[in-house]
Image (tube, rainbow, N blue to C red):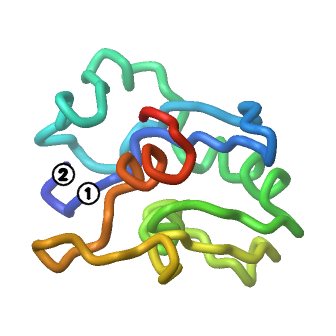
Amino acid sequence: MTKKGDRLARISIVNFYGNVVFDTLVKPWAKVTDYREWITGIKADDLKHAPSYPKIAPILKKILDDKVVIGHTLMEDFHHLKLNEEEYKCQYRDVSCFSHFQKMTPEGGKRKLKDLASEFLNAEI
C-alpha cells in the first residue's frame, strides 16, 4: 500500500498447464507505507533489487500479445499494470465475473480466488 493506494509488487504468469512462464517482483513507483506482509509475504528487502515496471513492460507485451488471459479480478491487475487489452492485443476472461463460479458471499462480495481454487480445483493457495 502506498499513499496513492494499492500498487503492484509481483507479476506471475502461468500457461495452460500451470507451468511458470514469468514471475518477478516489481519495484513500486511510490513509497510503500504498508507491505501487508501477512497477505503478500513480501518484505522491503525483497523489493530492493527488483526491476521497475518500465524494464519488464516489453517482456509482458511479448508474452501477452495475441493471447487469451484467464485470471481473477483481471481488470484490477491490468489497471495496476497500466495495460489495456487493445494495446496488448489480448483477450481476457475474468473468473471473478463468471456467474458459474460466483455465488456471492454472505457479506455480498465476490468470492476469493483461494476459495474458488479449493472448491473447483481441489488446490490450496
Give x and y (percent) for residue 42: 31, 26
Q: Residues within 10 Å of mark 1 (few under 14, many from 20)?
A: some
Q: Is residue 9 above or below residue 81?
A: above
Q: Are marks 2 and 1 in contact (CB under 8 Å)?
A: yes
* Residue beneath the point at 51% across and 36% down: 123
Amino acid at circle 1: Asp
Q: How many marks?
A: 2
Q: Element under label 2?
A: loop
Instruction: Give the labeled residue for mark 2.
Output: 2
Identify which residue, 51 or 24, lies in the foreground. 24
What residue appears at the point 74 percent right and 84 percent down from the top-left corner?
86
Measured along the vertical axis of the image, is residue 121 above or below residue 103?
Answer: above
Q: Residue at x 76, y 46 (%)?
A: 59
Q: Left or right: 117 with respect to 46? A: right
- Which mark's residue is nearer the viewer, 2 or 1? 1
Q: Kindly identify the amino acid type of the residue bearing the numbered disc 2.
A: Thr
72 or 91: nearer the viewer: 72
Residue 6, which numbered label? 1
Quadrant of the frame with the C terminus: top left
**Occupied quadrant, residue 89:** bottom right
User: Which residue extends farthest top?
Assistant: 45
Image height of 62 relative to 105, above or below: above
Q: Residue furthest right?
A: 66
Residue 53 shown left or right of residue 102 in the figure: right
**Quarter location, residue 121:** top right
Q: Which mark is residue 44?
A: none
Residue 39, horizontal then vertical, whole percent? 23, 36
- Provide residue 35's location: percent of width, then percent of height: 20, 35
Under circle 1, the secondary element is: loop
Q: At 19% across and 49% down in the image, what residue appears?
A: 1
Measuring from the top left, give residue 13's x and y in whole percent.
66, 44
User: Within 10 Å of the Cα at label 2, are there few (<14), some (14-19), or many (20+) other Cα atoms?
Assistant: some
